Amino acid sequence: MENLLNMIQALQPLSSELQGTLVQMLRRDTFPRKHWILQPDQVSDRLYFVEKGGVRGYYLKHGREVISWFMKEGDFLISIVSFYTRQPAHEYMELLEESTLLSITYTQLQQLYRDFPEFNTVGRLIAEKYYVMSELRTQNLRMQTALERYQQLLTDFPDIFGRVPLKYIASHLGISPETLSRLRGQRN
C-alpha cells in the first residue's frame, strides 16, 4: 500500500484526512495465476493497482486472443469504457502470475472526487498518463516496424520474457510467434 500512497503523493500531496479515507476504502486481494479480474459482459466496477504481479488485457477476434496490454507492479488496471460508462465490458483481464491488487469501487472513487476536490488532480494525472500510453500503443502498431515495436516493449517492460508466455508477447506485438523468435535471435 505504501507504493501506491507514495506514487499518489508524488502527483498531488494528500491531506491526512484524504489519506486516511483512501486507506480505509482500499481493498487488498491476492489472486492466483490465470484468475480473471474481468470478463466480457461484466461491468467493470473496480479500479485496481498492481502491488505485485502481472496482468494482461485481451479480447477475442474470430476466436483468437488479441493482447491489448500488459501491466505490472506500479500500474493501474481498468476497463476504461466499461468502468466509466457502467456498460458491460468486451475484454478480459487475466492475471499472468499470482498477484496482489489494491482496489476501490467506482462508487468509492466518485465519493473521493466529491469529498476531496484535490483528489480530482490525482485522477486527471493518472487518466492522462494512461491515455497517452494507449495513444502511443495505437501509433506504434500503425507506424513502427515489428522490430521497433519489439524494442519498445523491451524498453517499457525489460523482464517481460521471464514473466509472459511468448505467444502472448507475439499477439501484443501483432506478429507471429515465429517472427518473434527471429527478432529475439537478431537481438542476442
Image (tube, helix red, strand yellow):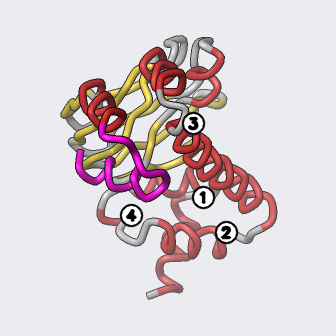
Q: Which residue is mark 2?
A: 146
- The secondary structure type at the circle numbered 2 is helix
Q: Residues within 10 Å of mark 4 (few under 14, many from 20)?
A: some
* Residue at point 28%, 53% (across, down): 3
Residue 97 lies left or right of residue 158; in this view the side is left
Q: Which residue is mark 4?
A: 160
Q: Residues within 10 Å of mark 3 (few under 14, many from 20)?
A: some
Queried whether the magenta region covers residue 9, the answer comes back as yes
**Closer to viewer: mark 2 or mark 4:** 4
Residue 182: where, in percent of width, then height?
Answer: 54, 75
Q: Are marks 1 and 3 in contact (CB under 8 Å)?
A: no
N-term-proximal mark, 3 vs 4: 3
N-term-proximal mark, 2 vs 4: 2
Distance of mark 4 from mark 1, alpha carbons?
A: 13 Å
Foreground pick, 139 / 177? 139
Q: Main secondary structure of the magenta part?
A: helix
Distance of mark 1 from mark 3, alpha carbons?
A: 34 Å
Foreground pick, 12 / 2? 12
Residue 161: where, in percent of width, then height?
Answer: 37, 65
Q: Residues within 10 Å of mark 1 (few under 14, many from 20)?
A: many
Queried whether the magenta region covers residue 32, the answer comes back as no
Name the amino acid type tagged 1: Leu
Distance of mark 2 from mark 1, alpha carbons?
A: 7 Å
Q: Which residue is mark 1?
A: 173
